[in-house]
Image: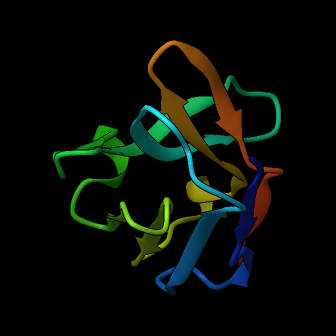
Amino acid sequence: VQLQASGGGLVQPGGSLRLSCAASGSILSLTRMGWYRQAPGKQRELVASIISGGSTHYVDSVKGRFTISGDNAKNAVALQMNNLKVEDTAVYYCYAARSGSSTLWGQGTLVTVSS
């Protein structure tokens, strides 16, 4: 099973983007899906996650601006990003955590926020 991420691009500060991530097949024992990001010269950080029951988690810097949503039936996750800031510039990676198995990772999609 592979994760395919899409939706990155170039946007001006204050703009919006929507990232999508879908699995190529069924993910057994899926526990949560979400997004990490890694900016140049910085460590990868967890941006948002959603567990199978629907609870969500956000890093403080994106609360109120980003919204994560999941589709359990399709093993898909999306990240709506509004009011983007220059500091949101990074490569965004989707992931799927599984009970008893290794985490699946998407290929990364670049988000650039610049005027």
At a point 61% along the width and 64% down the height, the residue shown is: 21
Quadrant of residue 80 within the rendered picture: bottom left
Q: Is residue 105 left or right of residue 35?
A: right
At a point 81% along the width and 29% down the height, the residue shown is: 41
Q: How many marks?
A: 0
Q: Quadrant of the C terminus?
A: bottom right
Q: Is residue 77 left or right of residue 89?
A: left
Front-most of 113 and 59? 59
Q: Position of residue 3 (x, y in %)?
A: 72, 54
Query: Taking 60 as reference, is 97 above or below it?
Result: above
At a point 78% along the width and 61% down the height, the residue shown is: 109
Front-most of 45 and 4? 4
At a point 50% along the width and 30% down the height, the residue shown is: 97
Front-most of 26 and 106? 26
Front-most of 43 and 98? 98
Query: Taking 20 as reference, is 52 above or below it?
Result: above
Query: Taking 78 as reference, is 7 above or below it?
Result: below
Q: Is residue 89 left or right of residue 61?
A: right
Query: Taking 44 as reference, is 13 above or below it?
Result: below
* Colour scheme of the rendered structure: rainbow
Quadrant of residue 71 within the rendered picture: bottom left
Q: Position of residue 92 (x, y in %)?
A: 67, 52
